[in-house]
Amino acid sequence: MKRKLHLWLFFGLLAFMFNGAVYAQDADTTKKETTQVTEQPKETTTPTTAVAGEEKSFHQVMKEKFIEGDPLWMAPVLLCLILGLAIAIERIIALNLSSTNTEKLLDQVKNALETGGVQAAKDLTAATKGPTASIFTQGLMRMSEGLDMVEKAVVSYGSVEMGKLERGLIWISLFIGLAPMLGFMGTVVGMIQAFDAIEAAGDISPSLVAGGIKVALLTTVAGLIVAIVLQIFYNYCVSKIDSIVGEMEEASISLVDLLVDFQLKKK
């Protein structure tokens, strides 16, 4: 189920990116054709341009900046954002589903031990979802071998569950580091192209230099924005994992205490 959700999110975001890029290219082409056909004096076009600029939405501005920044370099940065968000959303959903009310679970285990013994407690935890319940199940399965084996099983399986919770975070971290580097690479290539244009022209034109630098820096801005957005999601996932792991450790200690009391009562 988690894999299907991950795939649906990825393909949905990818389709949105593709449609937006195509629409932006069509709008840019139409704008260029209109500008070439209708050339008017600067004094006449200035108010119209200002009004048109005010009417542009944030979405339209972002699409225009994507085209100006060269899709060859902006597309990989956007792909990092889409993949990173898809993994982050999948992880957030999975982590929220993994959260368990440990106090309630411990009370249920205690009641099961008092009424039906270890087998009843084991059946209860096996039917409960979440990493904490899975750790309880592994510990109760080793109850016949002694409390030492219970503690070892809890510690060992706790490490396994922690690895499952952290799965996918390495990819988010990769995209956080990769997006700015792709942006810097696009900037460096754009600066080289701007200096090549200056060399070919044989003269330093302020408009030529400013335009080339602006286009080159757009990729850096895009990479930094992607890194900032993904970093927020990454930190949320890490904090959520720390919270779940802390609850797991406390619940595991409480489980061992319950089993010790259960054995003492049996004697």
Image: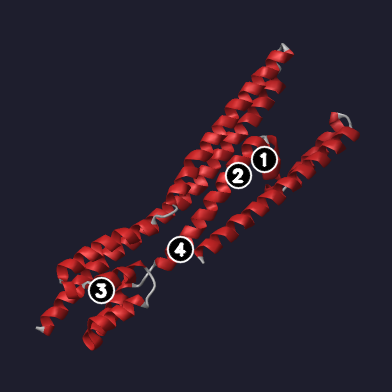
Q: Could you tell me residue 29's position as x and y percent?
A: 81, 39
Q: Are marks 2 and 1 in contact (CB under 8 Å)?
A: yes
Relative vertical location of residue 102 with respect to residue 238 in this rendering, above or below:
below
The residue mark sitting in front, 4 or 1, is: 4
Judging depth in this view, the residue of 191 and 83 nearest the camera is: 83
From the image, tell me which residue sits under label 3.
141
Which one is earlier in the sequence, the residue at label 3 or at label 2? 2
The residue mark sitting in front, 2 or 1, is: 2
Quadrant of the rendered structure where residue 133 is?
Answer: bottom left
Which one is earlier in the sequence, the residue at label 3 or at label 4? 4
Image-based side of 73 in relation to 231, left or right: right
Q: Could you tell me residue 69's position as x and y percent?
A: 66, 35
Q: Which mark is residue 66?
A: 1
Q: Are marks 3 and 4 in contact (CB under 8 Å)?
A: no
From the image, tell me which residue sits under label 2.
78
Quadrant of the rendered structure where residue 244 is?
Answer: bottom left
**Mark 3, secondary structure of its residue:** helix
